[in-house]
Every structure is written in C-alpha cells, then in structure tokens.
Amino acid sequence: MSSAIVTRFAPSPTGLLHLGHAYSALFAFEAATRSGGHFLLRIEDIDFTRCRQEFEAGILEDLAWLGLEWETPVRRQSDHRHEYVIVAEQLRVRGLLYPCFCTRKDIQREIDASGAAPHGPEGPLYPGLCRSLSDDERQSRIASGESFAMRLDLNRAIAEAGDHLEWMDLERGLQRAQPEILGDVVLVRKDIGCSYHLAVVIDDALQRVTRITRGVDLFEATHVQRLLQALLSLPTPEYHHHPLICDPDGKRLAKRDEAETLRSLKSRGLSPHELRRRFEFA
Ligand code: GLU
C-alpha cells in the first residue's frame, strides 16, 4: 500500500457546489482514504466581496450528503487573514513585493499603447507600470491615501529562488515551474488585503497537505505557487490536477449552471451512490 497522504478540498463559498466540485471533492477524499491518510476541508473565503455564509452552509450540507467525512475544526481562511498579512509583509521587507496603484483602466491603457503586450493563461501580463517607481513616489502616493495592491516582483523573486523549481504532477509527470507565464501577480489585493495564491500556499503548508488534488483549470496557478513555496521555505506537495467534468455539450460547468448544482440534482432524485458510480468512484 502507498504511504498515507493528506489531501484537501478547498471550495470558495461563492455559490453552490455543482457536479465538478463533487468530482473534485470525491477525488481528494478517495485518494486520502485509500492511502489510509487524511482528508481536510478548507473554506477559502478571503474574498468577502463574493463569499456568502449561506453558500458555506450549503457546501457543508452537500459534502455530508455525498458521504464525505473531514477532520475538524475546518480551517476557514477569513479567520486567519492576519497570518497572510504577516507573510506578505515579510516578502515586502525582503524587496519581493512592490505597491501597484494601477486601476484596471490604467493597465488596459498601457497595454493598448504598447501594441504587443505579452499574454499569459489568464490574459495580458501586468505591463510593469509601478515596478520602477522611486521609493519617494511610492511613499508620497501611499501618504496621500491612494489605494494600492502589492505585486510580486517576479525578476527579484526568481533571482532569489532560482529558475529551476520543479513539482511532480501525477497526471503529467515532473514539471518545471514557469512563473513567468503569470508575470508580476498580485499577492495583496487592494480590496481584500491578501490573495488566493498567498493564502493557499501558506495553508497547504500549515495543514501539512502532501498531495494537492484539484482541477486542471488551476494547473497554471501552480507555477507561481511553487515559486512562493521556495521563497517562503515551505515544502512542495505532489500535485494531481484532474480533468474537469463537462456538461453533455462538452462545456465546462460553472457555478452559474443552476441545473447542475448538487442541490438541484438532489431534488431531482439523484443519489450519492449514483453519482459515485457515474464518476467511477463506487
Ligand atoms: N478555492 C479554489 C476554488 O474554489 C480552489 C483552490 C485550490 O484548490 O487550490 O476554485
């Protein structure tokens, strides 16, 4: 038998779970329990602009209906905001983050003007407007009350962490991290004071997750998360980015697809057993 692994399912309560989430949750649960390991649930609710308490309650209810059991207490990211802020501040002090005052409009204007902005998997990369501001200018803009995000200075980060970072993906094999495909990502958002990338890396290490299972839609995120692990001297788990569940037309399911929420499938008589069979977990 393989050695015991620790997996997690980390939903954001911005909507109800759909079939794709059910697959992902079962995938993580099965991997952990088959190895005699642990399955964790983590509520990723730092984005208070989109997360809602009733969705969190619905998620817990749906996961229990699916037959999943998880360790308690469940880590809820909104209870740990200060921890992410402390780590971001450490990165800033090391010169790895810089304040970015740009609005979306500023960024778009710069991209339009430059003609050939490099593109990443999530769209055009940040063109670097605020990267080279002087310290004096930064201080005076902050003092005048301008709002700002904090971005990772990718070149400095790579210079510190090295450009030969790797991770093992159980679907695709050994991967070399290429954080440059995402550019200077935001690690501290203007509105919420932290970010998904930062919180997820800190939590996975803190919770001693040894295998991160999640949809292949998050594959690219792993490039920057691997870099953050190196910068923060955190261990690198193995990864299993699984295929996404699609609707009968081959379209990826989204939270807005009401018809495919577990709640609606449940009300139409679907049983957890049928679902497991459909996913071939039964
Ligand atoms: N919270 C993320 C989501 O709901 C998942 C994060 C992860 O698995 O790394 O899409």
Image: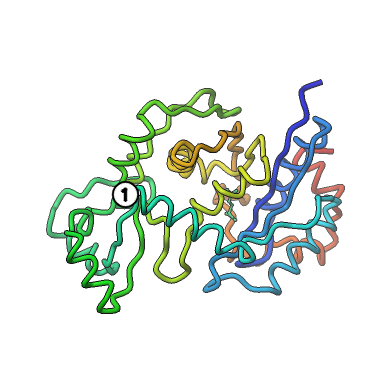
Q: Is residue 220 above or below residue 138?
A: above
Of 278 and 111, which appears nearest the observer? 111
Residue 155 visible in the displayed image: yes
- Percent position (x, y) of residue 230? 46, 36
Of 175 and 4, which appears nearest the observer? 4
Q: Which residue is mark 1?
A: 95
- Percent position (x, y) of residue 242? 61, 38
Question: Which residue lies at the image location 77% right of the left edge and 37% below the top edge?
Answer: 32
Question: Which residue lies at the image location 42% right of the left edge and 60% below the top edge?
Answer: 188
Question: Which residue lies at the image location 30% right of the left edge and 78% below the top edge?
Answer: 145
Of 39 and 134, which appears nearest the observer? 134
Question: Which residue lies at the image location 61% right of the left edge and 59% below the top edge?
Answer: 44
- Percent position (x, y) of residue 72? 81, 55
Q: Residues within 10 Å of mark 1 (few under 14, many from 20)?
A: few
- Side of 169 where 275 appears, left or right: right
Quarter of the figure that contains the C terminus? top right
- Percent position (x, y) of residue 33? 82, 36
Instruction: Count all numbered tags in the image, as a single digit.
Output: 1
- Side of 82 where 112 appears, left or right: left
- Kind of residue indicated by mark 1: Gly
Seen as rendered, the residue at the extreme top is 1
Q: Is residue 188 above or below residue 152?
A: below
Of 133 and 56, which appears nearest the observer? 133
